[in-house]
Image (cartoon, grey):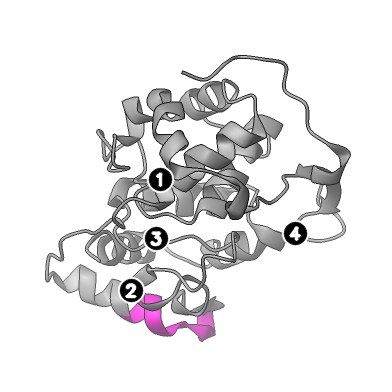
Amino acid sequence: MIKITQIIFSCSFLFFVSVGGAQAAQQPIAGGMNAAEGSAKAGKAKSELCQGCHGVNGISIDPTTFPNLAGQYAGYIFKQVQDFQLGNRNDDTMSAMAATVTSLNDLRDIALYYASQKTMKGKATGSKLEKQGKQLFEKGNPKKGVYGCINCHGKEGKGKSKDNALFPIIGGQTKAYITKQLKDLKTGKRTNDPAGMMAAIAKNLSDKDIEAVAEYLAGR
């Protein structure tokens, strides 16, 4: 179990940047982690509360509500939990759960544990919508200001580099989760994407585009 102690963020981990341009409100940015100092083994026990939603092996127990974390980059998990703690992201369930992880060391171990699991994998449907999603994911639609997701998220959404915590693995993620995040980015409900990059793209996606991309990625 995770000990609930006073949460203290070092000044070295927090600074302010302008998100999405000079006119955007400033928000605190979470720090990075050193994987060499953590323990995936220790993270299994520390992730006990997380397992209630994300599963023991990082496969969501409720795909319509909670995302898969299996094989996700540790640095991405580490940053996102801090963003919930700092108020950069908001979700009734996750914001409350993130607040219980009051040690950066514990958070690092939990992130490493889920990163060590077999990477999430979906099942392709072979549908026309999935094929449309693949085209959009790989090629984008530059005329609409939509660029290929593959450039940041890698082939089939399986990621480009574990050393880059900004762009997560999304291939094999749940369709409902991908759909919600893209719609939240489109409407401005979610604002913790780097430099507003994803929000700018999402705003140029139609609801049908979002459904197609989510269908494709959920099957990878």
Q: Is residue 194 above or below residue 113?
A: below
3D distance between C-alphas at marks 2 and 1? 20 Å
Q: Earlier in the sequence, mark 2 or mark 1?
A: 1
Mark 2 nearby-residue class (10 Å; few <14, some 14–19, many ≥20): many
- Displayed quadrant of residue 53: top left
Disc on res. 170: 3
In x, y percent, where is residue 116? 38, 52
Q: Earlier in the sequence, mark 2 or mark 3?
A: 2
Residue occupying the point 29% across, 34% down: 55
Of tags 2 and 1, which is closer to the observer? Answer: 1
Residue designated by label 4: 20
Left or right of 135, for residue 22: right
In x, y percent, where is residue 218? 26, 59
3D distance between C-alphas at marks 2 and 3? 8 Å
Disc on res. 156: 2
- Choose between 80 and 190: the one closer to the eye: 80
C-beta proximity under 8 Å, tags 1 and 4: no
Residue occupying the point 81% across, 51% down: 24
Disc on res. 9: none
Residue occupying the point 32% across, 60% down: 214
Residue designated by label 1: 114
The type of residue carrying mark 1 is Tyr
